[in-house]
């Protein structure tokens, strides 16, 4: 088990083999980069199709005794913008804590990772986080993956102008269906980037499955840079998932609008309220939508009655200890890792060599 010294914000478990990171200068950047808008829109249609094909699972979730909506339904175009706003809220410390780690330990992180990688940004959103690391990490290529491809395209259009030397590809993809990278993504020197503690949105069992999949896809000289939110005082976590302005509430309730457009259902958002809190027993922040009154919701081929006060579970966000997450990485097949934390020990960034 790892111990974190309060005054020490970096933990080294084992140094990655430095020679392994002499990489990819050989990668023919421009040939390997696919940057056409057409390709992106094709994949966008695939991502929309994935949500569409997920309708069966969505209906099963709505009909379950404890109703649930998969959290991928947060991220339509409006949902992605609301999430962006969440990251700027005073209560939502995660993004700022992670940024503080990057700026404090940039040199150390860059040395661990090595230059010339294919940076594969999982859940890229507005691509700002990865772009802020281009200077330090010096990737040869950037592959942005997100379920909301239209949002991605806007961000990539701007980045291509700013960084003409980095080949850029956008993939509109639903990663909850597994990560199938196209052949245009080189298999050597992959650096998977999974910031923001998105791994917390998987159950620990599913997280182990996802991490094992990434480990397999690392292949030659690959690695994973991943952000993880740490267990902390309940009041801080309650506020982070139920902010004073109600932005998280809008983000959560917007899932009902997205479900309406995918399923043709008739949820009336005004009938529902947001619930967000930290469940200490399960070590996870939970989000639910709760009916203000008894409602009947219909969709083509189905319907469900909800009693007043009934909830639909929309998200879990698991919180870990540093040692506990290190163990998960190890179980998932990563050989060794390094971890850095912010000064308050609220958040950790891990680099795991494949
Ligand atoms: C994307 N994910 C890491 C966020 C989280 O904190 O679990 C989503 C979120 N849910 C509510 N606020 C933010």
Image (tube, grey):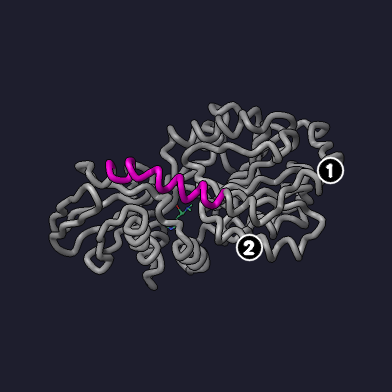
For disc 1, the marked residue is: 28
Q: Which residue of the protein is positioned furthest toward the bottom in this rendering?
A: 245
Q: Position of residue 8 (x, y in %)?
A: 64, 48
Q: Quadrant of ligand 1?
A: bottom left
Using the image, tell me which numbered label, if any, was put on residue 155. 2
Q: Position of residue 93 (x, y in %)?
A: 50, 61
Which quadrant of the rendered structure holds the N terminus? top right
Label 1, secondary structure: give it.
loop
Q: Position of residue 315 (x, y in %)?
A: 37, 50
Seen in the picture, residue 312 relative to 11 is either above or below; the reply is below
Q: In the shown orientation, is residue 265 left or right of residue 278?
A: left
Q: In the shown orientation, is residue 8 left or right of residue 44?
A: right
Q: Which residue of the protein is positioned furthest toward the right in this rendering?
A: 26
Label 2, secondary structure: give it.
helix
Residue 210 forms part of the magenta stretch: no
The answer as to whether callout 1 falls within 8 Å of ligand 1 is: no
Residue density around tag 2, few if under 14, some if 14–19, many if 20 or more, within 10 Å: some
Q: In the shown orientation, is residue 52 left or right of residue 165?
A: left
What are the residue bounds of the magenta stretch? 43-60
Mark 2 vs mark 1: which is more N-terminal? Answer: 1
């Amino acid at each position: 088990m790892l111990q974190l010294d309060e005054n020490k914000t970096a933990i080294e478990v084992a140094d990655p083999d430095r020679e392994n990171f002499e990489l990819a200068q050989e990668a023919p950047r421009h040939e390997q980069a696919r940057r056409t808008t057409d390709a992106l829109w094709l994949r966008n249609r695939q991502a929309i199709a994935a949500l569409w094909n997920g309708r069966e699972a969505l209906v099963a979730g709505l009909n379950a005794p404890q109703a649930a909506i998969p959290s991928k339904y947060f991220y339509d175009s409006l949902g992605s913008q609301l999430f962006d706003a969440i990251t700027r809220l005073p209560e939502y410390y995660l993004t700022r804590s992670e940024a503080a780690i990057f700026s404090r330990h940039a040199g150390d992180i860059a040395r661990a990772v090595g230059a010339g990688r294919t940076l594969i940004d999982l859940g890229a959103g507005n691509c700002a986080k990865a772009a802020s690391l281009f200077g330090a990490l010096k990737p040869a290529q950037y592959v942005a993956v997100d379920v909301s491809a239209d949002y991605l395209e806007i961000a990539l259009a701007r980045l291509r102008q700013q960084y003409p030397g980095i080949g850029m590809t956008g993939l509109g993809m639903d990663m909850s269906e597994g990560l199938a990278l196209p052949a245009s993504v080189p298999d050597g020197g992959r650096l998977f980037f999974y910031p923001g503690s998105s791994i917390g949105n998987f159950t620990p069992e599913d997280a182990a499955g996802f991490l094992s999949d990434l480990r397999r896809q690392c292949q030659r000289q690959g690695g994973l840079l991943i952000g993880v939110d740490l267990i902390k005082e309940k009041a801080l976590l309650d506020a982070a998932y139920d902010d004073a302005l109600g932005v998280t509430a809008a983000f959560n309730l917007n899932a009902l609008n997205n479900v309406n457009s995918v399923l043709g259902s008739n949820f009336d958002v005004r009938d529902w309220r947001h619930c967000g809190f930290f469940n200490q027993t399960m070590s996870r922040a939970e989000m639910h939508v709760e009916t203000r009154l008894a409602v009947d919701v219909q969709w083509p081929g189905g319907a469900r009655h909800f009693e007043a006060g009934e909830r639909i579970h929309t998200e879990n966000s698991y919180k870990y200890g540093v040692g506990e997450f290190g163990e998960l990485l190890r179980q998932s097949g990563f050989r060794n890792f390094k971890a850095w934390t912010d000064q308050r020990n609220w958040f950790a960034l891990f680099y795991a060599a494949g």
